[in-house]
Image: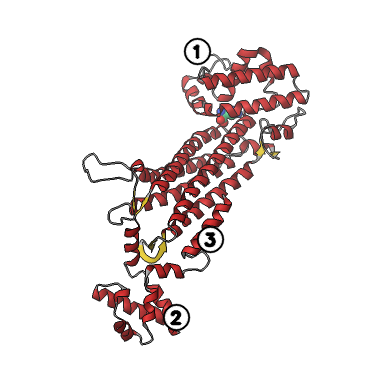
Amino acid sequence: MTGKSSNQMWGGRFASGPDAIMEEINASIDFDRKLFAQDIRGSLAHADMLADNGIISAEDRDKIAQGLNTILSEIEAGTFEFSRRLEDIHMNIEARLSDLIGPAAGRLHTARSRNDQVALDFRLWVREELEKTENALSKLIGAFLDRAEEHADTVMPGFTHLQTAQPVTFGHHCMAYVEMFGRDRSRVRDALARLDECPLGAAALAGTGFAIDRHQTAKALGFSAPTRNSIDTVSDRDFALEFLGLAAICGTHLSRLAEEIVIWSTPQFGFVRLSDSFSTGSSIMPQKKNPDAAELVRAKTGRINGALIALLTVMKGLPLAYSKDMQEDKEQVFDAAETLELAIAAMTGMIGDLHILQDGMKAAAGSGYSTATDLADWLVREAGLPFREAHHVTGRAVAMAEDKGCDLSDLPLADLQAINGAITKDVFSVLSVEASVASRTSFGGTAPKNVREQIAWWRKQL
Ligand code: ARG
């Protein structure tokens, strides 16, 4: 066919076909072919419903179903010929159906429009993607739980401002990520719950005069109910925005984890060693092991954020109901979904494989006067000092240790007593990093016993 003959689906009032540039900007088949399985699934449910309600004959329904199943196999086998002239996946499939079964194909589009059709297909696709994301996050959480269990007692420095703050356990740090990815997973579930309404039957925007049964198609396609307003149905892309929103937040969490792995694996920190499977070498510096996978995850967050902003911008200010602008929704979501899936999988692998350098962590945990708060707390508890005064006394002890170039626990008792007479040798029992973490038993605190309780709680959630 030449580009100038009118469209076989909607060309009735057109004398000639589109300009080549028009076809180029209008066609979405190059990307929306990804929706073929969803499109066919929706059409099968629609044809069944039309036949069950006496809108088309059972004979036509059977022909349609047979034709659609043939098309499904053709596309899966790679023998289907997609045509840009037919714009999108919906019309490519319908045109082929017409080749295969003749005039009965023309009855499939009764009481339906591409507007509710694409809203359905895309929703089905996003629903599957959300389910995949939920599974992937469960695996990532599982990987963290295993590491947390292994390292419930392993001490490391906890940071604020990336300055050594107080000792924590590596298990507790892992569990912080479990909380973050756990919230991501609950956002996925929220999105799935809100997405759970079927758009099919809203037609172009106003519903239809045919006696369709939207509850039947909703049920057949695995939704709890049909959507309630036909105008909203064809103009709503919240489900895609929500997916991108949760993907962006999850990507942000992944990027923070990636950054920590990059920092921890430097010789300067020496907290972890990357496995060979998730690092690369340098072509010029033989000593190097680079955290490329972590760096790429850190960067890929940018793509996901970009997709969210792009779709928000497409939707912003659009009048109700459908506008062709909305065709620009898909590529962003496809790319973000692929990116997120890969990033989560890479992080799951990396976390499982990470060698934890306990000695390096422990040495760092004890440096930087990380148990100064424990000294101040001891003064409050054992010597009855107000916390502010205890803070001041401890500050003087830190200054003295700094002068002497030693740790707090290395200061002679006499020197500590010169700062405050109430100090006894018992104070040394709280100055070790192990004692410090073991003492932090408040709910949500870093004590190994608490970490084990949290791990058990999370295992039950999975
Ligand atoms: N390819 C279109 C899209 O993705 C399908 C809907 C077309 N609807 C229309 N009224 N032109 O949005």
Q: Percent from the top left, x then y, of residue 145? A: 48, 52
Residue at left 65%, top 25%?
Answer: 43
How far is the residue under mark 1 from the one under mark 3? 70 Å
Q: Mark 3 sits on what residue?
A: 453
Position of residue 371 in the picture relative to residue 188 (left or right): left
Q: Which residue is mark 1?
A: 2
> Compared with residue 64, is residue 444 higher up or lower down, i.e. above or below?
below
- Work out whether residue 51 or residue 420 is closer to the camera in this orientation and state it: 420
| Figure check: 335 above or below 25 | below
- Mark sitting earlier along the chain (2/3): 2
Q: Nearer the viewer, residue 83 or 64?
A: 64
Q: Residue at x 53, y 49 (%)?
A: 184
Amino acid tagged 1: Thr
User: Image check: 101 left or right of 279?
Assistant: right
Q: Is residue 236 above or below residue 164?
A: above
**Identity, as a three-letter code, of the amino acid under mark 3:** Glu
Asked whether the viewer can see residue 385, the reply is no
Q: Which mark is residue 397?
A: none
- Taking the image as four quarters, which one is ligand 1 found in? top right
Q: Residue at x 73, y 16 (%)?
A: 59
- Pointer 1 or 3: first along the chain: 1
Numbered mark located on residue 380 in the image = 2
Residues packed near mark 2 inside 10 Å, few (<14), some (14 to 19) or many (20 plus): some
Check if mark 2's residue and mark 3's residue have beta carbons within 8 Å: no
Residue 405 as seen in the image, left or right of residue 338 = left
Residue at x-position 53% and y-position 59%: 454
Element at label 2: helix
